[in-house]
Amino acid sequence: MIKKMFKSYDYSIVVAVLLLSVFGLLMIYSSSTVISVTRYDEYTGGQSDFFFQQQKKWLIIGFIAFLSTMIFPYKAYASKKILQGIVLGIIALLIFVFFLGHTAGNAQSWLKLGIIRLQPSEFAKMAVIIYLAAAYSKKQSYINQFDRAVLPPIIFVGFICILVVLQPDIGTATIIAMIATTIIMSSGMGIKNLIKLGMLALAGLILITPIFVIFSNQIFTEKRLGRLYGYLDPFANEDIVGGGYQLVNSYIAIGLGGLNGLGLGESIQKFGYLPESHTDFIMAIIAEELGLFGVTFVLFLLLFIILKGFLIARKSNDPFGSLLAIGISSMIGIQTFINLGGVTGLIPITGVPLPFISYGGSSFLLLMISMGILVNISMFVNRQLDKSQEMNEQPIKHQQTFRKPISY
């Protein structure tokens, strides 16, 4: 039984995740050594490899979480007790943030648990994915009944998004909404219900407008407005306050890298020119040091994981497993697009880390947990395919026929 289980895992995903994680750790070391002793010296104590050491700890923790969720049967997440625990737990954490939260990056979105800092909004992504996958998989027999099947899960997602926006963390709330939209569109409901949801979302935006007005000073800070101005015309706002500073220096880093890059560890922009070089803009440093080849390596592995996830979802005959795989894959795809869109100026900068590569404990731990779940789904899918092949194969009977001897 155990032998068959381990034989059925999709180890290509495991290899891709490990390659990205180790490569990310290497690039965090390369991109953070300078700012560790300059910009963050009070926080790091002047230790040049501080961020590298911290991320190394998270890599070990994340790998343990990855192995645990890889073995744990994914179908158990849909059970009533576990699902209730996940939902109530994430709501409690998001509410605790308002009273016990630690502020970082103009958002009160962190909880300090001893020496560990966790960001509950990151884990809210996975909670929403599991909840929506479980809810819509159980409602398949009446999925087109709007009031009974479609609407209740949307109310939960809307409540989670409001809690995250009020931190304020608009970037994460946007990602949660986009992930939810992907799962909803894949749930099997009819086009009429999708149109109703679109109208409901528009009405919801109109209704929450007063919230944005009331908390405008907290939500639309000078830094956030600067990012918008910097996106619209980065070269007209190259100073730090104006917002174009990061984007312009990102362009410079990408341009300096060219095809082959300047060489590992040889970045110029990480010497204080490019803020957040180890987090949101780490891809710019990869482009500068390793060129197009380094960027292609990262994008290929990320795209491989995303497509693998959707392929697993397509092969699964379990609605819960299929929607769960779609949610996980879309989460990685959306985060990758938003991060790279900000680095290249395609969309405004939102402070979203690059999956598996950027520095950040909560984000990395969430990704490793989600990857473990995806690998576990792949195991069940492969076992299901093996069983169906065994049932369809019929033993072929080889009958040897003999001719009668010709009589003359």
Image (tube, rainbow, N blue to C red):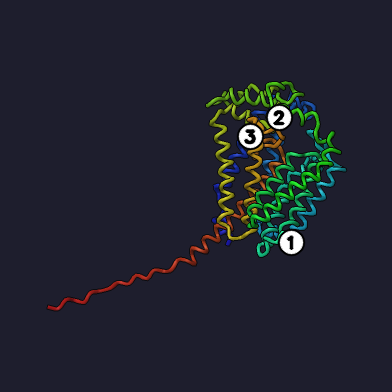
In the displayed structure, 24 sits above or below 253; it is below
Specify few, some or many for label 1: CA neighbours under 10 Å numbering under 14, 14-19, or 20 or more: few
Q: Give the residue at the far left of this rendering.
A: 408
Describe the element under mark 3 as helix, strand or loop: helix
- Cα separation, mark 2 vs mark 3, equals 14 Å
Residue 237 in the image: state x and y as whole percent: 72, 22
Describe the element under mark 2 as helix, strand or loop: loop
Specify few, some or many for label 2: CA neighbours under 10 Å numbering under 14, 14-19, or 20 or more: some
Which of the two discs, 3 and 1, labels the residue nearer the N terminus? 1
Q: Is residue 73 visible?
A: no
Camera-nearest residue between 125 and 206:
206
* Left or right of 54 in this view: 309: left
Q: Mark on residue 276? A: 2
Q: Is residue 109 visible?
A: yes
Residue 399 in the image: state x and y as whole percent: 32, 72
Which of the two discs, 2 and 3, labels the residue nearer the N terminus? 2
Residue 24 in the image: state x and y as whole percent: 63, 36
Q: Amino acid at mark 1?
A: Arg
Residue named by callout 1: 148
Q: Quadrant of residue 215?
A: top right
Q: Mark on residue 340? A: 3
* Left or right of 360 in this view: 402: left
Judged by depth in the image, the label closer to the viewer, 3 or 1, is: 1
In the displayed structure, 340 sits above or below 113; it is above
Q: Amino acid at mark 2?
A: Glu
Q: Give the residue at the far bottom of this rendering.
A: 407
* Left or right of 36 in this view: 251: left
Q: Quadrant of residue 61?
A: top right
Q: Amino acid at mark 3?
A: Leu
The answer to whether the residue labelled 1 contacts the one labelled 2, judged by CB atoms less than 8 Å apart, is no
**Placement of the N terminus among the 4 image quadrants:** bottom right
